[in-house]
Image: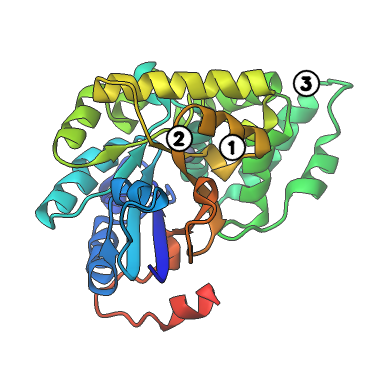
Amino acid sequence: MSTLTIVMYHYIRDLANSRYPGIKGLTIEAFEGQLDYVTKRYEVCSMRDIVDAVHGRRALPDHACALTFDDGFLDHFTVVFPRLVARRLTASFYPPVTAIAQRTVLETHQIHLILAVAGDDAAALARRVRALIDARGDADLPPAAALYATHAVASRFDGPDVTFVKRVLQKGLPPRVRGDIIRQLFDEYVGIDPRVVARELYMDLDQLRCMVQHGMEVGGHGAEHVWLDTLSREGQEREIARTVDFLDEVYGERPRDWVMCYPFGAHDATTLDVVGAAGCVVGLTTRVGVARDLAQPLTLPRLDTNDLPRRGDASPAALEAQRG
Ligand SMILES: [Zn+2]
């Protein structure tokens, strides 16, 4: 192989005619265009091919590419799966255990839905979050203005208000506090029973098994979709044990040489130790880049779908520049 390009996808749907058109996702048309582009420029591999290459059993093609779909969204079954089958492509899917097994909306996705409803008025949502933080009158919490000053910085794809909302609600506040605030905002903005939303949002076990039967692969994405590097070793071991049990349920046998996709890309030396001891051979991060070798298979970089063109006839020039 000269390069291995792993592309990461999340929501893919007919956005304009969906319940939350503001959600940060890819349209079906853009996805099809990107498949045209990818199949023209790359050779699409399976994770099995990559695992075999890691073990030195075979070499990957020159311009290898792998398609990865995070978070277990129903979009992946209804939109992605039939289009992959039609093109005789394979891909891998990374559902968090809780989303599939307990059918609750993960906090990180509740935040996406709240942001989708808030739409262009992220500033008002950020003000509401600040008000909810200060209204708690909790002496252990920093003032909302200080949190805003720290976290409201534009990121790769988001403006400062959206980044602030995501960061404080995902990680910046203590778990109990952010749980309360997310519940409150979900009620105010989305206003639908989360159990109903979960059934519209995620695949179920039978759908995952169906995709596996038709050549797709399912890997680990943790149980609760948390930053693994924030947990103790025992906490990380529990997350990975639940992940392995879940893959066992999907495949009907103990997973061997499996693939782990770290939630939020977060991992530390302990994570690599724990997943390695559990039989994981390939790890996917959110570090932006293209792999040039497989020397560090537990921390492979990925590109976001937004980094690739969405038309079969697009020039790869922009991407080549990004790789440098
Ligand atoms: Zn995820």
Residue under the point 19% across and 45% down: 81
- Is residue 169 in sight in this rendering? no
For mark 3, give the secondary structure: loop
For mark 1, give the secondary structure: helix
Looking at the rendered structure, the number of numbered marks drawn on it comes to: 3
- x, y percent for residue 284: 48, 47
Residue under the point 52% across and 45% down: 298
Task: State how far apart marks 1 and 2 are (Cα).
Answer: 9 Å
Residue 155 vs 320, above or below: the answer is above
Q: Which residue is mark 3?
A: 136
N-term mark: 3 or 2: 3
- x, y percent for residue 231: 67, 26
For mark 2, give the secondary structure: strand
Q: Amino acid at mark 2?
A: Cys
Q: Which residue is mark 1?
A: 272
Nearest the viewer among 196 and 315 is: 315
Colouring convention used in this rendered image of the protein: rainbow
Q: Which quadrant would residue 217 be assigned to in this image?
A: top left
Q: Which quadrant would residue 32 be assigned to in this image?
A: bottom left
N-term mark: 1 or 2: 1
Q: Which residue is mark 2?
A: 280
